[in-house]
Image (spheres, rainbow, N blue to C red):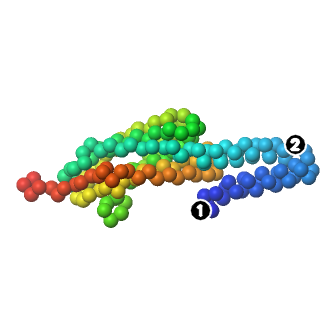
Amino acid sequence: MMRRYSLFVLFFLLWGVSLASGLMWGGFNPWFLVGSLGLLLSYASLQHVLTLRKMKADVLVSTHQTIAGEGVEVHVAVKQTGVLLPVPWLTIRDVWSDNQGRDVYRCTRLVFPGLSRTIDYRYSIMNIDRGIYGQHRIELVSGDLFGMLKSIRTINSPPELQIIALPRPVHSL
């Protein structure tokens, strides 16, 4: 946890040292550092607090029941409905788990949405194994442009979103 905030704390300490130096000795350089680091820290804080707050995700699958060994097409749409703050980068991790909670299938996308409010993409789960895949979640990871703070949000899908892979019929072997 602390490792995630270490760069932010380092810049905050540098800002505090620059402020103390500016108050004690004055001059242009410490006040320039106070101003520029203050803007940088406020941008990182706003980005961390406001970016992933009101994100919604919709997942559609081509079929809810398939035969083991076949593929399933998945369509993911992520929408930002909150504050219009540009998102410099966003990692979308789509995870399917089996009934025991083990992560079985995973699709990760790195996108650079900027001011775009909607991100759509499709992927296929090929050669699906037999079983019930009903625990689905989308993990969103974003951060500021300089990598000081990272925001993580997990969106769980409703329980009715599941894929059932039935065994292959004997006559088709």
Residue at 53%, 46% in the rendered image: 52
From the image, state whether disc 2 or disc 1 is nearer to you: 1
Identity, as a three-letter code, of the amino acid under mark 1: Met
**Seen in the image, is 108 located left or right of residue 23?**
left
Splitting the image into 4 quarters, where does residue 60 fall?
top left
Identity, as a three-letter code, of the amino acid under mark 2: Phe
Pointer 1 local density, CA inside 10 Å: few below 14, some 14–19, many at least 20:
few
Residue at 57%, 41% in the rendered image: 88
Q: Nearer the viewer, residue 160 or 35?
A: 160
In the depicted structure, whether residue 143 falls above or below residue 101: above
Splitting the image into 4 quarters, where does residue 73 fall?
top left
Pointer 2 local density, CA inside 10 Å: few below 14, some 14–19, many at least 20:
few
Residue beneath disc 1: 1
Helix, strand or loop for disc 2: helix
Residue at 7%, 55% in the rendered image: 171
Query: Where is residue 43 drawn, in percent x and y?
Result: 67, 43
Query: Where is residue 71 drawn, in percent x and y?
Result: 25, 48
**Seen in the image, is 50 located left or right of residue 70?**
right
**Marking on residue 28:** 2
How far, Cα to Cα, is label 2 from label 1? Answer: 36 Å
Q: Nearer the viewer, residue 155 or 1?
A: 155
**Seen in the image, is 104 located left or right of residue 151?**
left
